[in-house]
């Protein structure tokens, strides 16, 4: 048997029949051909930042650690090996005077894992990671290594390359093993970041203005209070004025991790005090501002382990969704210590992007890992699905292919592409059998 794989949240694990760490696309190709020949299924993991079982397999598990680094760079693009972490990519781009236009708030993910599960940040004009992809290198089920480009006009296994590109960018690894990702990049830029507490009531009354007035809006609502921490990030000409070493440690490490983790631990042992602890946290929030390199503003440190469910709803339903979640918590006796995070993105043309075809808003609910609360997630999920919500592919949910086919207009087209590329479903696993059918 191979070594046991566990995800970051420690809620998913598997001991596959075999584990390999390929160091080239050719070694990935050999592994795929070996798996198919022996009747085993094959999956490539990332760094384990998905909360679902999307990366698991009892067959041949490929680890990404041998596929790292920048392979090539050109005018407005870079090609990164699939196992390169977003943090490593950011550092290399910065060295070259380049940057991604947008990203999520975690930089520990591999680039392939982030793209394949639809990782996103918050952006008025620029979407998630998949929307910044120009090409994907993939190993198909017969071992062939192909490169699929957004501007390609060929056909692969009878599928138009443009269709395959739109299907493959967010494909959960179901179409093939991604071995490299080519991103659109731009000259490095600064972001002016303003962090400010606001009431949820005030935010609900000015949502359209807040979204329209900021390139990147992100806010966190503290349950059992009317307080939110807003983060408004906009491009700035400079000069840079990053937070000092002490302020960075205080905000990013002590307040958001050490102290917050201690409060979660207290709340886990005595749930009845969580509303008071949240009120205390709300009272300590204060306004701050800095101007810094973009990726340092986009990303955060996350050391307190949690479980997460996130849904994308049509942007116009955000206010209703938040009001219903607030009312749900008022009605029920749940004690929720973790903030509810809200972000927005423009529409995407990747078929299985949670933002496909519509401007979207994301509502993410978290619980402290030692104290899961399935009823909380179930109650929020009922609200989100009633509003046509799409669950984040890497976060907890209970939806299956029947539901997902109703909210993704190109779902059937995606399945047809999958059958053309991988008719034997060599890249499937138990989780994909549920969400893709």
Image (cartoon, rainbow, N blue to C red):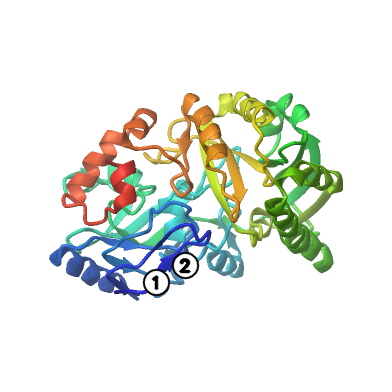
- Decide if residue 360 is in sight here: no
Q: In the image, what residue occupies the spot 76% across and 41% down?
A: 275
**How many marks can you see?**
2
- Decide if residue 87 is in sight here: yes
How far separated are the C-alphas under marks 2 and 1?
A: 7 Å
Residue 1, given in percent of the width and then of the height, sits at 29, 74
Whether 16 is drawn above or below 350: the answer is: below
SS at circle 1: loop
Residue 288, given in percent of the width and then of the height, sits at 83, 50
User: Mark 2 or mark 1: which comes first in sequence?
Assistant: 1
Q: In the image, what residue occupies the spot 81% across and 51% down?
A: 289
Q: In the image, what residue occupies the spot 44% across and 72% down?
A: 68
With 81 as the anchor, is 292 left or right in this view?
right
**Do residues under tags 2 and 1 come within 8 Å of each other at their CB atoms?**
yes
**Label 1 neighbourhood size at 10 Å, few (<14), some (14-19), many (20+)?**
many
Q: Name the residue nearer the viewer: 246 or 326.
A: 326
With 339 as the anchor, is 376 left or right in this view?
left
Dividing the image into 4 quarters, which one contains the C terminus?
top left
Looking at the rendered structure, which numbered label has been put on residue 84? 2
Q: Name the residue nearer the viewer: 74 or 159.
A: 159
Residue 332, given in percent of the width and then of the height, sits at 64, 31
Looking at the rendered structure, which numbered label has been put on residue 67? 1
Q: In the image, what residue occupies the spot 26% across and 36% down?
A: 413
């Amino acid at each position: 048997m191979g070594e046991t794989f566990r995800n970051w949240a420690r809620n998913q694990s598997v001991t596959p029949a075999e584990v390999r760490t390929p160091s080239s696309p050719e070694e990935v190709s050999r592994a795929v051909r070996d798996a198919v020949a022996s009747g085993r299924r094959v999956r490539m993991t990332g760094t384990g930042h998905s909360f679902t079982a999307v990366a698991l397999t009892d067959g041949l598990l490929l680890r990404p650690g041998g596929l790292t680094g920048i392979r090539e760079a050109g005018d407005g693009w870079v090609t990164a090996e699939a196992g390169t972490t977003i943090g490593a990519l950011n550092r290399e781009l910065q060295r070259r005077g380049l940057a991604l236009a947008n990203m999520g708030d975690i930089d520990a993910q591999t680039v392939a894992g982030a793209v394949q599960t639809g990782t996103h940040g918050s952006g008025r004009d620029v979407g998630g990671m998949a929307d910044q992809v120009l090409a994907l290198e993939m190993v198909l089920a017969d071992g062939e290594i192909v490169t699929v480009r957004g501007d390609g006009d060929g056909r692969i296994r009878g599928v138009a390359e443009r269709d395959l590109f739109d299907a493959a960018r967010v494909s959960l690894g179901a179409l093939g093993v991604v071995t490299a990702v080519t991103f659109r990049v731009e000259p490095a830029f600064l972001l002016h970041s303003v962090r400010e507490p606001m009431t949820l009531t005030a935010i609900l009354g000015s949502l359209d203005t807040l979204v329209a007035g900021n390139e990147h809006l992100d806010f966190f609502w503290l349950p059992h209070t009317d307080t939110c921490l807003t983060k408004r990030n906009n491009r700035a000409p400079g000069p840079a004025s990053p937070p000092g070493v002490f302020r960075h440690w205080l905000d990013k490490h002590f307040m958001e991790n050490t102290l917050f983790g201690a409060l979660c631990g207290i709340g886990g042992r005595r749930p009845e005090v969580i509303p008071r602890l949240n009120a205390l946290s709300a009272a300590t929030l204060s306004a701050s501002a800095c101007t810094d390199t973009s990726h340092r503003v986009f990303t955060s440190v996350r050391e307190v382990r949690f479980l997460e469910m996130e849904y994308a709803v049509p942007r116009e339903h955000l206010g209703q969704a938040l009001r219903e979640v607030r009312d749900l918590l008022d009605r029920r006796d749940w004690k929720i210590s973790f903030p509810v995070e809200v972000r927005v993105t423009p529409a995407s043309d990747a078929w299985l992007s949670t933002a496909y075809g519509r401007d979207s808003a994301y509502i993410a609910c978290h619980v402290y890992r030692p104290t899961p609360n399935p009823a909380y997630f179930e109650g929020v999920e009922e609200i989100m699905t009633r509003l046509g919500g799409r669950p984040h592919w890497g976060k907890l949910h209970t939806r299956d292919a029947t539901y997902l086919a109703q909210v993704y207009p190109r779902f059937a087209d995606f399945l047809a592409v999958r059958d053309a590329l991988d008719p034997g479903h060599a890249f499937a696993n138990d989780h994909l059998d549920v969400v893709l059918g």
